Each structure stands twice: as C-alpha cells, then as structure tokens.
Image (spheres, coloured by chain):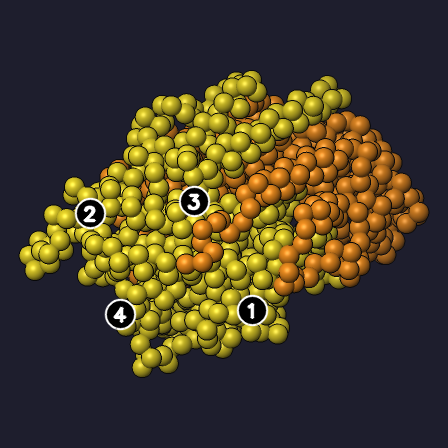
Chain colours: A yellow, B orange
Amino acid sequence: MAGLEDPGWEPAAGEEFLREALQVLLEEAVRKGTDVTEKVCEWREPLELRELLDLELRSGGEPPERLLQRCRDVVRFSVKTGHPRFFNQLFSGLDPHALAGRLLTEALNTSQYTFEVAPVFVLMEGVVLAKLRELVGWSSGDGIFAPGGSMCNMYAMNVARFQRFPECRSLGMMALPCLALFTSCDSHYSIQKGAAFLGIGTDNVRLVATDERGKMIPEELEKEIQKAKAEAAWGGSALLSSKHRHLLAGIERAHSVTWNPHKMLTVGLQCSAFLLRDTSGLLQRCHGSGATYLFQRDKFYDMSYDTGDKTPQCGRRVDCLKLWLLWKAIGTQGLAQRVERAFACTRYLAEEVKRRDGFELVMEPEFINLCFWFVPPSLRGRESCPNYWPSLGKVAPAIKERMMRKGSMMVGYQPHGTRVNFFRQIVTSPAVTRADLDFFLDEIERLGWDL
Amino acid sequence: MAGLEDPGWEPAAGEEFLREALQVLLEEAVRKGTDVTEKVCEWREPLELRELLDLELRSGGEPPERLLQRCRDVVRFSVKTGHPRFFNQLFSGLDPHALAGRLLTEALNTSQYTFEVAPVFVLMEGVVLAKLRELVGWSSGDGIFAPGGSMCNMYAMNVARFQRFPECRSLGMMALPCLALFTSCDSHYSIQKGAAFLGIGTDNVRLVATDERGKMIPEELEKEIQKAKAEAAWGGSALLSSKHRHLLAGIERAHSVTWNPHKMLTVGLQCSAFLLRDTSGLLQRCHGSGATYLFQRDKFYDMSYDTGDKTPQCGRRVDCLKLWLLWKAIGTQGLAQRVERAFACTRYLAEEVKRRDGFELVMEPEFINLCFWFVPPSLRGRESCPNYWPSLGKVAPAIKERMMRKGSMMVGYQPHGTRVNFFRQIVTSPAVTRADLDFFLDEIERLGWDL
C-alpha cells in the first residue's frame, strides 16, 4: 500500500517545533505572564480580537514560524491567570511543580480507565485520595477525581440517591417517591444544575435559610448530611492548616466531600476530588457498567486496579500527578503554609479596608473571601439618600471596566440578595506580596475616585 | 503582617526546575516515548510498582534533583501511548502541534466560563465548533466542548429530554410520563450510564437489534433520531475525508452529534465536542443558571460571549487550542490525509490477516476497526471440536499478558455477544508505518505460536 512506508509526519521537524513552542511557553506565558510589571490582560473588543487573531481554519497548513507567532498571539491576548494581580476568580498563581506535573501529564496522554494503560496513575490517584480522606478524618473510604467541583457535587447527589434507592439506576426517578434535596440557600449553583441534570428537578431543591454570614441556621439542620455534600469544595484545603481546620469541624461526619485543590492550592485546572466514606463499593455499583472492551474479567492482573468504572466518564484525564508532584515538592507543611498565607493576606486586606476612607466591608471575613464596597467621594456621607444604594451598585462594574481596559489587574464583583454589587477578593497565589495587596486597594481608589 | 513582604515561593528556583522538567519531558516522554526501538511499557506488578515509586505524601518537601528523578520514574513506568506500537485503545500518537497547544493551555491555566477570563478561547471555541458543524453539514447551530464523549452523550440525552419536556428541569422526572430511550444494542456504554445518571433508568433504554455488522436494523429505525445522538463519537473524523465521509451519510439530519477529535485526529485527551443543530438557545436554557458572580448582567461587553453557562460544569478546561493549532498547522487537507492514512493502514492489515495462515477476520472492516482472531497451530483445523471456541477465547488474553510483560506493544481484545475474545486493532497515529503493522502481526504470531 503506497505511502505507508514512511511515517505520516516528520518527527525531527515536529520536535524542533515543540522545542520552540516551549520557549514561547517559558518566556511569554510563564516569565512574562507572572511578571508584576506586565499587564494582567490586554483588552480587545470581541470583534477586533477576532480580526487580530485570524482564527479561521483553512484547507492548507501553515509554516512553523507562522504557527509560533500564533502561539505568541494566543498568549498575548489571553488573561494572565498566574499574574500576581489576577484576583478575578477562585484560582490563580502558577506553581512550577504543579505546572511540571501538568505538562508531563499532557505529554504522557494517559486515559485513566485501567491499570494496564495507567499503572502509575492508578496507584498515585489511590495514594492522593487516601491522603485527602485522611485530612477529612477518615481512615478508609473511596473516591475519584472528576472534571470539576460541579461534577463532583452531581456525583454526590447521584450516589446519595442510589444508596437510598438503588432501584433508581434501573427504573429511573419515575419509580421513586417524590424526592427533596436540602441545601443552603447560599450553596453553589451546581446543586441546582445537578438537580436539573439528574432528573430531580430544581423545584425539589429546598433552600434552607441562612444567617447573615451565609451559614445554614442550626434549627434547620436536620438536613445536615445533604448540606455537607453541597459545600466544602474550595474550602477543603483549610484542612491542611492546624490553625484553620477548625472552620471545617465536623466534616468527618459527612458521607462525602467535594474538594477542589485547583483553588487554594494553586494546582491548576482541573483537580477536583470526590471523596466518599463508604467502603462497600458503592461508587462502583452506582456508576459501573463493566464494558467488556475495557474491563475484561480474564485479565492477568487484579482487576480491582481498574478504577475507571467508578465514574460516569469513559476516557478520563489524569488529575493526580500535578497535586502529587507539588505535595512531594513542598510537603504537607508547605501546603499548610500556603493556606495560612492566604488567610494572612485576607486578614491584612480586611484591616486595610477598615482603616481606609471610602472602603467598607460587607462583612468581617471568616475564611479567605473578602467582600467590600468602594464608595467614591461623590457618594460618601449620602447613605440616607434614596439613590445611594443603586448608585453604589454601579461603582464596581465601572471600576472593573476601567481596570480591564488598562490591564492593571482583575477582580470579580457581584450582587448578593439585597446587597448591591461589591468586590469579592480572594488571594490564593503565594506570588502575591503585601505590595500587591496595597496596589490592589490603591488601584481601586484611583480608578473609582471620580465616579 | 509578617511574611507577606516577599513571595511565598522562589520564582527563579521554580523556573529552573521547570526548565529541567521540560528536558525530562522532551527526552523521556516525547523522544524516547515515541521511539520504536524502546519498550511500549515496562510492566511491574501493582505492589512492586507501588514500592518502586515511593508514592507516599509526607510532611516535608524534597529537593529538585529528587523531584526530577521522580518525574523520570513516572515517565519510565507509564505506558507510552504515543509509541508507534501502542494500539490498545482508541487514541494514540503524539502530534507535536496538538501537544504544543496542550502545553500552552496548561501554562495559561484558563477556565473557560466568561469572555473576560477567556477572550481568546471563547472566540476560538466558537470558530472550531462552527467548523465541525460545517463538516456535519449544518450552516448554523450551537455546541460546547465537554469532558469526554460519555459526557457529550449525557448532554445530548438531557437536551433532548428538555426540548420535549422543558418542565423536567424544574419538576424532575416525576412529573413526566414514562420515557423510553432507543439505542442500538451495540451502542457505547455511556448511554446506559447516562440513563442511570439522568434519572431515566437503564430499564427504559430500549436496545434495538442490529445486523451482524452492528448496524441498527432499518425496520427498527423509527427511533432514528435517538440513534443519531448515541453514535458518531469517534467516527466523526471520517467527515474530513471526501473519500470516506459517505460512511456518515445522513448525519446532517441528526439534531445533535458527539465528536471526539482526540481519537482519530490524535489531538490528545480530552477534546470532545457536543454539536447541536438548534439555534434557539436550547443549550443555554437547558443548562444555564445565571450565577451572579460569573454572569453579571451589567458587564461592559456583550454577555453572549460568556458561553460558560451552556454546560453543567462550572470551571471548564480549554479544549479548543490543541485542535485549532493542529488544524492551522496541517489544514483541513492534512487532517483528511490522516483519516485516509488510518483507513489505508486498516485496509493493509485486513489483507495481511486474510493472507496469513492462522489469522481470521471477525468481519470485513468498514471503518478503521479491525477485529480478528489468531489461531495457534495447536487449534488449527479443529473448528469442529467442542472445545475449539472456549480454547480460542483464551488465546488473546494469554498473548496480551506476554506482550505486556515483554513491553513490545499493546493492543486490546474483547468478547462480543457469542464471539469469544478477539483482538481489536485501531491505527490512528501517523507515526505508524507498514513496518510497524508487519511487526504487529509477526509479534502476535511469535507470542501465540506455542499456545
């Protein structure tokens, strides 16, 4: 058959391209992307950006130099989430050990379904999950990495339903009595999404009232088990700190826990663990299907190492290596220090917000969420005017637009209940110093002064 | 606050570590991992491997040299899925352009929920999805990348349910009439998993009989729409070849398509597109929840660019860059050539299997699945003996064990219905040459000769 004598690509040229692309990665994405003197983002309007990038896919290919320029452009116009002044969402920072783990994961391109294909990662995932369970306070149990905390929460809801009503798997929700799902009215939106996806229905999600700090009111806590499943995803890392783990006191009484090390531990997207206290094989019974082309019964090794049937996924990325390598690099102690540093940053910012004119805390932070308003001079002292709150609600979006166009930093804002738009600051990256925190407040003041 | 003056890590040391880890990646994972003279795997029993790797996570950290050795060990004992003789599952090959895209994706660490965080990737995903839809035959539509084909199939089932019964989202399955889901009895196991997960129930999956080639029998095809949703995931890439796209004739009549470019196009795990013909915003209505901390209504740019609410996920990895960069590098033409090369490899192997003594096709391949038995000399000519088929069923597992222990290559086997274990060979990597295909059959013969 003509054409099969030689490979369908040129290995040497490919390797050369890869080496050069790695230079772009190191220089542009890593070094410049984390350099505090560079912009966090280079804002372009969508239509202009589309034009600039020439995204169109065509019939012919392009030469290496052109492709490398495209790589540079992709980095240039992407938001630098590892920049010390990227505070926009619940992840930030570019840990070199975790990143090395992630790059190796890509190069090995392993699908984590069976031991024969993923021998190292099946064992490694087991060790990492056991370590996370140990921090929760369980000496045994089960678990699996999943594509994100929302999926973990859906797994938890599905496993809970299956445990109580195993017939749901074969007969569906139609065979069950009407179910209700209790969660905090401030719980993550994945609970609602999950209720819709799993066929439970969002109307059957009962939102339990919370106090002013967003905690479920104790009198409502007959439904405690469901609550435990619905929360803890990004706060889980506080378990690493002996100083702060009291915030999660009682978590060991939960039946399952969702934990996102990609947030506070700067492991990189995605690293989400779904942990179960169960040791009876519930996860396998709930999700397993025993496909004969992957999970043959006549393998020459112990099939219990083929963990891939515990998930609703088929092919599944390796999410343990990045966390494992980081853990090996800095140890449990080092991880605890990161958690404590995040708390210290929040503490410092909270004191500054209280000290500075025109800054106002939404509430005293308990965890590493700092919620506050910036009140421009034009609104100060006018709290009793009827248009005070509506006007204040327009301040954060206006400041956000200015910071994005300038590229100086990024932070999120949101309204909540009757509270108008406030900034929500979360510092997780160890790259952030006091100078960055001072800059953060100074910049908000500068950008919002004339509003 | 003490300790916040300086960063919580040492950037220069981190960068140095990263550079050295990238050398390990290039030398060990890429160069040696794709070198045909190296082993595909270095088999160790689970307990021995656990010992060798010292996976335990401890309180203290480790020095860089130790960590680099760990990286080398991880690569050493991992299966080389990019090796020309890794034929084990539906993916293989290590394309340098796709890999560069994947490594950049990791370094940028972007969560694809909003335009403000993912400006380049929101636009790029739109272009890539539109291109895939164009190949399906749709001039407009919707879509989203998802964590794997199984999840895509669940999205499809959920969207179909929502379109017909929008009240399911709020009221749950309990408010619906009893639903039935029609699929081929040879469809992928994700349909059953999805039926369980979505609360439909596996008993309500009606398996439609297939002919001997595994195709649904036309008389049963009133349920054609559901079938279209359940299939096409890894065969989708045949659409790129004008020579082979007739195999998917009629796909443009489907309402949705699941397509895994991480299989035949060697893009790398994971790259799974869920494509919809709908233009009414069904996906957003079905999955959207409008969380106010991400999808604020008072943003300064057009919110329709915040595509992250179309998925049941919250944080979502970027899966478009690797495919986009590969496409830019080799063009639609180059992708079509890969598809045609995969067909040519299968054709060559099928002819060889027919020509060689002791090899027997399970059926003539139509796509790039080649299913065959190897009959060792001891069983030849004994087809009429009552123990012929049971004995033949033990041959593939025995050969598999020997190839794993030797590390010479990897290929999957499985039984199917009344057919005993056969090998299932799928060649997708352009690195595979005729010499590798000859080696593949020779090696099976060598390993199974004395059985």
**Secondary structure under the numbered disc 2 in the rendered image:** helix
Q: Nearer the viewer, mark 3 or mark 1?
A: 3
For the residue pair B119 and B415, the one nearer the viewer reads as: B119
Q: What is the x, y in percent for residue B435?
A: 80, 28
- Residue that carries the numbered disc 3 in the rendered image: A84
Task: Say which amino acid is labelled 1.
Answer: Leu
What chain does mark 4 sit on? Answer: A
Q: Nearer the viewer, mark 4 or mark 2?
A: 2
Q: Which residue is painted at 41% across and 34% down in the image?
A: A38
Task: Say which amino acid is labelled 2.
Answer: Val
**Secondary structure under the numbered disc 1 in the rendered image:** helix
Q: Quadrant of residue A451?
A: top left
Q: Which residue is painted at 43% across and 39% down in the image?
A: A36
Do we see residue A438 in this rendering? yes
Q: Do labels 4 and 3 share a chain?
A: yes
What chain does mark 2 sit on? Answer: A
Q: Which residue is painted at 56% across and 69% down in the image?
A: A135
Badge 3 or badge 1: first in the primary sequence: 3
The number of callouts visible is: 4
For the residue pair B140 and A320, the one nearer the viewer reads as: A320
- Residue that carries the numbered disc 1 in the rendered image: A135
Q: Distance between the residues labelled 4 and 3?
A: 31 Å
- Residue that carries the numbered disc 4 in the rendered image: A212
Residue density around tag 4, few if under 14, some if 14–19, many if 20 or more, within 10 Å: few
Q: What is the x, y in percent for residue B41?
A: 77, 45
Q: Is residue B334 left or right of residue B75?
A: left
For the residue pair A186 and B342, the one nearer the viewer reads as: A186
Residue density around tag 1, few if under 14, some if 14–19, many if 20 or more, within 10 Å: some
- Residue that carries the numbered disc 2 in the rendered image: A395
Q: In which quarter of the image is residue A327?
A: bottom right
